[in-house]
Amino acid sequence: MKNSWIATSLAAALAFAVPAVPAAQAAPDRYTLVHAGALLAVPGKAPQREMTIVVKNTRIVGVSPGYLDAAAAAIAPGAQVDLVDLRDRFVLPGLMDAHVHLHGEPSFSRHRAERGDRNPPTSSEGAVNAIVYARRTLSAGFTIVRDLGSDDEAVFAVRNAINAGRMIGPRILVSGSALAVTGGHGDSLPLDETGDPQARLRDGTCDGPMECRAAVRYQYKLGADVIKFTSTGGFGSNTGLEPQLFPDEIEAIVSTAHLVGLKAAAHAYSPIAIKQAVRAGVDSIEHGFLLDDEGIALMKKAGTFLVPTLSASYPPPVFRIRDPESVRIRNEHKAFERAHAAGVKIAFGTDAGTFAHGDNAKEFGLMVKFGMTPMEAIRSATVVTADLFGVTADAGTIEPGKLADLVALAANPLDDVGALLKVDFVMKGGQVAKRDGRMLEPFSYPQPSATF
Ligand SMILES: [Zn+2]
């Protein structure tokens, strides 16, 4: 039951790295020795100098002092061994972003309006965007992301194509449509489809516990890895800050998600809505701009994660905001500062898509500006977010048994966290995706079937 979605989605995500060849032609083991000038293997612990990471196929099998060769790494003679020389680089685990919208971009709707297109963006356009932005996100050093709301099936398709090795990108945990009530933040139905049951399911629009349970199960059937719901209004829809769901609707969504083995993420600004979601057992509060002391205490007790998305305010989005006071409150970032000081678990999440994809790492600078040390911010984007995702056994640190997801940069991010904006090497699942600042082409295209 616990995190059973890992068994489905992440297992599929990991499978991509092993070429799909018949068993009779099973590929020999492939080793990679990574020589790291500085290695932050476990964020939260001190970095080490002059280390070797031994990778076998997709996973790390050793982390040792010194620059080992194949013999010193006890690799059997004759095995395929590649060397990756990062002796002048700072190496750390692949980064994670718990809140992106890969189909979206700030101009997605605005540009259409400017050229007089009356229709909303199509799912196909969203999928093409997500292909481009998934690649850009991996290039920025993010090897696992959570896509929290795309209003269609576009990001499912992109996730599946990445997992199958047909294109390059991070591992993606997909929510599909964010669930919202009629007229709420996230209800994007045209008026004449508001009563159409099928349209409501597709859009994730639900009123009342029974319909909200059905909405969770629909996303689950589509292949969701996580359930997202919008329990308050939002800036993006200009619907204010206040609660939009009744407690029984929140409870229905969270408990149904957990019943089918998925985590639940609540978009929530108002302190009342935050507390209702935490009491219902939600796994993360997204944004949480108006979090109060009682909410902080509840989150600490329940172990609920805050995903602060500070980047969403810098620069302020293009949205028309009705209430300047709400913008002021958001931009003060008091909730982040107080939650951090109180010891609430803070996962790394940006809301990329409301600003440019690939700039996800600017969140590090804001986290440090508002009270974290660089080490705490890096730990948030690795160890802590892996915990939220339920993938601690597979990711978050550079240790034997974990996936070989690692990134490298020229400068020490513990001195200047802004260095994380310049990731110039990315390895995902043991395969080099970016080297010397340049993305490589997709790792491998699957062999076309001979029996069409
Ligand atoms: Zn968002």
Image (cartoon, helix red, strand yellow):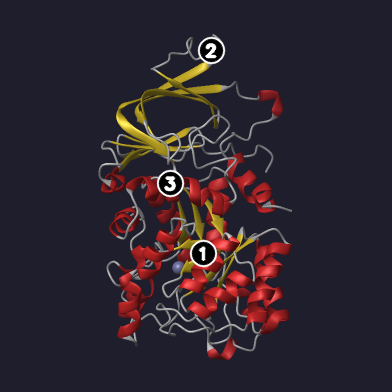
Q: CA distance from mark 3 to mark 2?
A: 31 Å
Drawn side of residue 240 relative to residue 244, left or right: left
Q: Circle 1 sits on which residue?
A: 148
Q: Amino acid at mark 2?
A: Ala
Asked whether 411 or 375 is in front, the reply is: 375
Drawn side of residue 42 relative to residue 159, left or right: left
Answer with mark 1 or mark 3, whichever residue precedes in sequence.
1
Q: Amino acid at mark 3?
A: Arg
CB under 8 Å between discs 1 and 2: no
Percent x, y of residue 57? 55, 28
Percent x, y of residue 41? 44, 34
Q: Helix, strand or loop at disc 1?
A: loop
The answer to whether mark 3 is within 8 Å of ligand 1 is: no
Q: Quadrant of residue 26?
A: top right
Q: Helix, strand or loop at disc 3?
A: helix
Q: Circle 3 sits on which residue?
A: 379
The answer to whether mark 1 is within 8 Å of ligand 1 is: yes
Q: Circle 2 sits on which residue?
A: 74
The crowd level at tag 1 (other Cα within 10 Å; few <14, some 14-19, many 20+) is many
